[in-house]
Amino acid sequence: MSVVPPFDKYAAYQVAVQSPREDARFLRRVYRELRGREPLVLREDFCSTFTLCCEWVRLNSENQAVGIDIDPEPLRYGEKHYASELSESQQRRITTLQRDVMKSGSVRADIVCALNFSYFLFKSRQSLVRYFERCRSTLLTNGILVVDAFGGPFHEEPNVHTRRLRGLTYYFEQETFDPITRHARFSIHFKSSRGRAHKRAFSYDWRLWSIAEVRDAMSDAGFSRTCVYWEGTTRKGLGNGVFSRKESGEPCQAWVAYIIALR
């Protein structure tokens, strides 16, 4: 009788959700556009398996990356499965820290990022501003903070987004949404090609911050200015994965954007 290998939720997440190579190149492009120079040091808050850090040090032989996450499990996974694929030189240029991002010490960086909507866990404006203040205080002189956001009417009611991948089906379920507090609960489920379900592989309890709210919080945290990189659309009206700086966006049922704050 054949033995079914254990389900690897981090590998499934990597395939279904992440694009670390493209993210690393996007961060470099944005910094070049906004600062006219090369960024060298990246700090990835809420880094999980720190795949973005790994891709960052691959971009340039001088690049350095610091990944911070409070959970030791994904950090161990990243060490075993992703950092191990790097050269010795690349490994030496990555530092991982198991700690609260609000206690990140004096790690200085050209770019601080909190992607995959991770900062949505801050539910009060006071805590969000405090986090942004912390980020600003650890940025280098020409540093930038990069976060992403999503929204639209589609995300203001319970729903399930399904995507079929090779050997895997991915489900992003919005279980609840409170229009007064804008608090929402989400879960990621997977189903293997053999039909085996893996319910709530990842779960999130978030506040859906609007772009305007995030920019206001960044300004109150002391950043000099902010800008938005908005996703373009295909002829069918779907996101095309290409982000460019915009002053206004078109109404969409669902949208994704990056919000950049300049120190």
Image: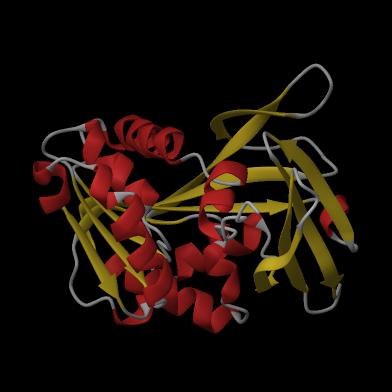
Please state if 134 lies on the left or on the right of 154 as rendered: left
Please state if 254 lies on the left or on the right of 72 as rendered: right
Please state if 92 lies on the left or on the right of 220 as rendered: left
Q: Residue at 30% across / 82% down in the picture?
A: 103
| Residue 222 % position (x, y) | 37, 67
Q: How is the image coloured?
A: secondary structure
| Residue 158 % position (x, y) | 89, 63
Question: Vertical placement of 39 versus 66: above or below?
Answer: above
Q: Residue at 77% across / 40% down in the picture?
A: 163
| Residue 144 % position (x, y) | 33, 51
Q: Residue at 37% across / 76% down in the picture?
A: 72
Please state if 131 lies on the left or on the right of 203 as rendered: left
> Closest to the observer: 82 or 132?
82
> Closest to the observer: 35 or 103?
103
- Residue 214 picture quarter: bottom right
Kindly tell me whether residue 37 is visible in this rendering.
no
Q: Quadrant of the N terminus?
A: bottom right
Kindly tell me whether residue 183 is visible in this rendering.
yes
